[in-house]
Amino acid sequence: MSGSAPDPPRVALVTGGARGIGRAIVLALARDGLDVAFTYARDADAAARTAREVEALGRRVLARPSDAARRDEAETAVAATRAGLGRIDVVVANAGITGPDGWEGVSTDAWHRVLDVNLLGPYFTVASAAAELRRTRGSAILVASIAASSAYPEELVYSASKAGVVSLARSLAYALAPEVRVNALAPGWVRTDMTRALHTRPKAAAAIARGIPAGRWGEPEDVAEAVVFLASDGARFVTGETLVVDGGDSLVWTIGAER
Amino acid sequence: MFDVRGYVVLVTGGSRGIGRAIALELARGGADVAVHFRAESARAEEVVRAAKALGVDARRFGADLTDREAVAGVVGAAARWKGRLDGLVTSAGIYRGPSLEEVDARGWEETERTDLEGTFWSVQAAAPFLRKSDRAAIVTISSVFGAHAAVGGAPYQATKAAVEQLTRALALELAPSIRVNSVAPGFVRTDMNRAGHEDPVFRQKVADSTPLGRWGEPDDIAPVVRYLLSRQASWVTGTVVGVDGGIALR
């Protein structure tokens, strides 16, 4: 055996990691052998539970409350991750909120709140971590949505914010190459707290599942495994891409699936 | 990591280049691989030996994929080999880069029949076997030229665009029993691109134009195919994943 020290464990920073897709991402990265820092908005109990699950997997964990819309808090989260876990190899900008219902009469404040969290937030997180990711030749993954690429007036503001995230991934991929890869993920209908109003109503939930070619709702783990893939060495030549994880939902248009 | 252990996968065009790398990556993941070849039996046998050295079973299957009956024969033989088929990777393809005026009937036919019909007939023949698998998935191989234009090789580009739409149409038609996705490589150092990467000027131009700063290698493409075939991608269908170092970002 050589006398060289073993490689230090890789470290991920996940925003919005306490619940839903973010929690699944945190746990999947931990299962893949990474130590994980994550931020959360308010739910300290859920954050503590997720942190304990990471520890049970034998990985180090750091959970801290953070406002995903604020540049200074993104910088603090990056600094705290470096201080606490030593380095950052993977950044997952997952924190997001749904917007106001509908397209009419959206207030300026509502627009700003959604764009601040969903679009500016990922920018602040990746920009704050850019120098460290360059140092570690790491990668960033931004969680967008299939709402970015189809008409969705019911959630116009949310959809527009997620379309921005897809664009962000492209430009940041170009800007941070060749040291850092940046990709986006576009999940479809996934069973989380965010979609609870739909998946807990049997008729609505079944109608949505029927409309998805794969025949089922997505689980947070479906998205998390895609993150693990994009963060892995197996994706070493993939950058600026948007990986769609939606059970084929975005293939469906008004009459396309009729026989 | 991305779990293909115990799968039986047919890789068309598996004797060389990207197909070879895919066959060996799947073997590393624990899949038994049926290695299709057109002409290069000895090279296919070398891939079979390398796969077996990784602890899985492998066998070569020869056929001309432009012939629908030959495709049905070889896919059937591959499916009977282990009594099941869980995956199909349609990696067989050719590249020609003539100008509009230079394309003759034979040149068009050669490209379209190998890259598009070969893919289609392979999927058609494999579907009945794949439907019996509880983890069935197909990965087609497109190209960055399936969605981004270049001067020269219009038939190849049109064919690859068609492969991408075939992927989407068949993902819908074969859902929910078989997932269908595509991988779109950029410039990759293979025999197919030998003229390009052996030309020092063009070689440098590609590297300089690629945000990640280099040509792709077959081993860059293979893990993406493995992920798409794996259980972990069981909710991914109808997508095209570019594996091009970001060359088409602008």
Image (cartoon, coloured by chain):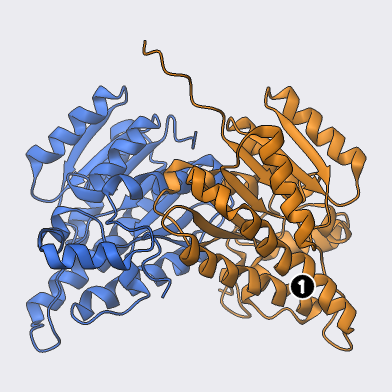
The number of numbered badges drawn on the structure is 1
Helix, strand, or loop for circle 1? helix
Residue B13, relative to residue A253: is it above or below? above
How packed is label 1: few (under 14 Cα within 10 Å), some, or many (20 or more)? many
Which residue is located at x 54 percent, y 65 percent? A172
Q: Residue at x 79, y 75 (%)?
A: A155
Instruction: Please tell me which residue lies in front, B135 or B140.
Output: B140
Is the residue B250 above or below the residue B183 in the image? below
Q: Which chain is blue?
A: B
Q: Nearer the viewer, residue A221 or B204?
A: B204
Q: Looking at the image, which residue is at 22% across and 68% down?
A: B205
In the image, which lettered chain appears orange?
A
Q: Is residue B128 above or below residue A239?
A: above
The part of the image, by quadrant, that contains residue B62 is top left
Residue A184 higher or lower than B231, as above or below:
below
Amino acid type of disc 1?
Answer: Leu
Q: Is residue B150 left or right of residue B63?
A: right
From the viewer's perspective, is B171 left or right of B103? Answer: right
Residue A42 can be seen, yes or no:
yes
Q: In which quarter of the image is residue A207?
A: bottom right
Q: Name the residue under label 1.
A: A115
Provide the chain ID for the residue under circle 1.
A
Residue B182: image x %, image y %?
A: 41, 59
Image location of residue A170, percent across then percent down = 52, 68
Q: Which of B68 and B47 is in front in this view?
A: B47
